[in-house]
Image (cartoon, rainbow, N blue to C red):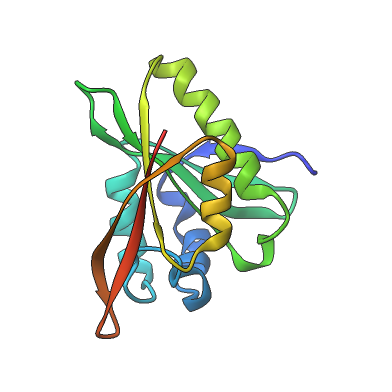
Amino acid sequence: MEELTYTPLDDSHANGLLSIWSDVDVIRFTNIKESCTLEEVKDKIRVLKDFDVFVVSNANGLIGIVGCPCIDKAKSRYGLFYQFCKSSWGQGYATAATKWLLRYMREKYGDITFFADVVVDNIASEKILKRFGFKFISQEDSFERNGIKMKIHNYKL
């Protein structure tokens, strides 16, 4: 696989992330309820850039985002998420980025606990989590999209 680079998230990534967060095929596997506008992408960046969140790029440019927002610093609990453009699906990029991020977070913070949630139909994402040892802990109705309650699987590592 080609080499990936990981760059801390900042405002300059807005247009690249717009192509991901406005793609209905991508967001159907996320907790994003509807396609984002550029201003909404900028709002998300303002929130996420204070955490350990990175854009993932290959030789062609930005292909995704991966991050571990802090859930509870005192208890060393962090969330894990990744989202990639549709053209990069099935090529191992999310797996490689997850491997890199888990190692980065452990080197930076030591012994921490990771949590991740997955929209139930996102089989590929669940396979990635299980590959790294995440364990299923619960299912819940999380948010509504187009009048339908979305079921979420919660995982812990």
**Image position of 93 with respect to 150: above or below:** above
* Spot occupied by residue 72 in the image (x, y as percentages of width and height): 21, 30
**Image position of 16 with respect to 2: above or below:** below
* Residue beneath the point at 58% across and 58% down: 124
Quarter-wise, where is residue 114 in the image? top left
* Spot occupied by residue 156 in the image (x, y as percentages of width and height): 38, 38
Q: Quadrant of the C terminus?
A: top left
Q: Is residue 116 left or right of residue 13?
A: left
Q: Is residue 57 left or right of residue 70?
A: right
Q: Name the residue furthest bottom.
A: 147
* Spot occupied by residue 148 in the image (x, y as percentages of width and height): 28, 81
Q: Is residue 41 left or right of residue 93?
A: left
* Residue beneath the point at 31% across and 71% down: 150
* Spot occupied by residue 75 in the image (x, y as percentages of width and height): 22, 22
* Total numbered labels: 0
Q: Nearer the viewer, residue 86 or 132?
A: 132
* Residue beneath the point at 43% across and 17% down: 108
Q: Nearer the viewer, residue 91 or 47?
A: 91
Q: Nearer the viewer, residue 141 or 52?
A: 141
**Image position of 148 with respect to 30: above or below:** below
Q: Name the residue furthest right.
A: 1
* Residue beneath the point at 60% across and 53% down: 62
Q: Quadrant of the N terminus?
A: top right
